[in-house]
Image (spheres, rainbow, N blue to C red):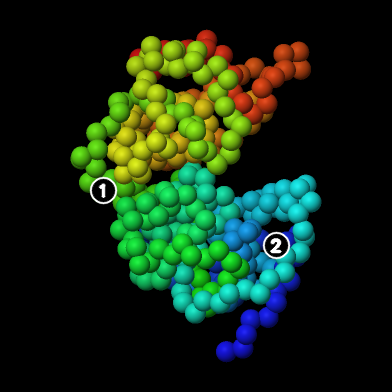
Amino acid sequence: MSAPQETHLRVDRLRCHSVIDEALHAGSATCQLSDLATSESPVHVLPLDEVLYVPELELQIVNGGIVPREAIRDCWNLYFLQGLREDRGDARQLSFIPDRRDDEVCVLSNLFAPAFGEWVQELFHVLLLERAGFTGAYIVSNLPAFAVASLELIGVGAERIDTTVVRPTVFRRAWFTTAVSHQNVHEYPRVFAAFRDLFFSLDVSGEPGLGERLWLDRGAHVFNPGRDLVNQDEIHHLVSRYGFTIVDMGAFTLRKQVAIARRMTVLAGPHGSQFVHAMFMTERSTVVECFSPMFINPSILEICYALRHRYFQVVPVNTPYSPYEWEKSLKLLPLHLELVLRSLD
């Protein structure tokens, strides 16, 4: 085998598209998981040869410059990264001699995966691949401890969890699946049901919940800091009057978090990754998501729709004659929030 040659990668020239759609169009072989698919939403698993993974970018790259949409869920994520690097003045070209691995893997250390809400979506890849009989390694380098913990929790053996890939690496074969995420679960009801069954099958009987009504704070260790609750003491006092327990999910093990979420009937708090726990609540629960008017990103609407949750948004006033002053930080109007909380009784 010849030594790897130096690679010159133009970050600004990377493009994104679906490698599964391309394979289907070309008549290439894919594995279809018919038991998890519907006629409207087929589910595929696809191996690709010679896949470059660049940890610095958190991107997988095939055919010299294509980022598989299946690895980042939405092509917009790539273009956001490119714009961010451009704004920062980062080098457009990366040069390196990649390592080479002669095994079969699924890379889970993808763009934004260090955020818990994004990481949970990587577990859909794991569910689909395990159903397809995949026996290779999962690459989870440079991720928080919850990544390894979650894989072990759902039964992936430690020998298949690889945290060692820190340099650009070409894998002989990497596996991709249909991009199921919490932003399209309504389109994949069987996959979502199997995902919930996986977590509901966990024995958490020894992990008591913290109550039915929980206010989930963003916590001290978050992926995207700077979205603090400005009038926290005032809001904490208010929600306590309505029977809420104030919780930082990040302070607990993942097993405990699942146990807490399964016993919730009302989830409320400032927008953040903690809202992904809505997918572990029983059907027809209630979600109250609070936003700064400068950052409204309701990324769990599909979850709430699929599970028939009641869903409320609480957003402060922002008008030309009364402009919002706290940017992405959140200063809630207690009266608005209390109107929503009253409706819960």
Query: Which residue, as the protein is rendered here, is positioned at the far left?
Result: 205
Question: Which residue sits at x=68%, y=71%?
Answer: 96
Query: Dot 1, crowdedness within 10 Å: few (<14), some or many (≥20)?
Result: some
* The disc label shown at residue 202, or none: 1
Residue 291 seen from this side:
no
Question: Which residue sits at x=68%, y=26%?
Answer: 327
| Residue 189 location (% of width, % of height) | 40, 49
- Is residue 135 positioned above or below 257 on the image? below
Cα–Cα span, label 2 and label 1: 40 Å
Q: Earlier in the sequence, mark 2 or mark 1?
A: 2
Q: Which of 3 and 286 is in front in this view?
A: 3
Q: What residue type is labelled 1?
A: Leu
| Residue 83 location (% of width, % of height) | 74, 49
- 159 sits left or right of 229 in the view: left
Secondary structure at badge 2 equals strand
Query: Dot 2, crowdedness within 10 Å: few (<14), some or many (≥20)?
Result: some
- Is residue 11 positioned above or below 52 on the image? above
Question: Which residue sits at x=73%, y=61%?
Answer: 11
- Is residue 204 positioned above or below 62 on the image? above
Task: Tally the numbered discs.
Answer: 2
* The disc label shown at residue 15, or none: 2
Mark whose residue sits in front, 2 or 1: 1
Q: In which quarter of the image is residue 240?
A: top left
- 294 sits left or right of 225 in the view: right
Quarter of the picture holding the C terminus: top left
| Residue 261 location (% of width, % of height) | 34, 35
Secondary structure at badge 1 equals loop
- 330 sits left or right of 273 in the view: right
Query: Which residue, as the protein is rendered here, is positioned at the far bottom?
Result: 1
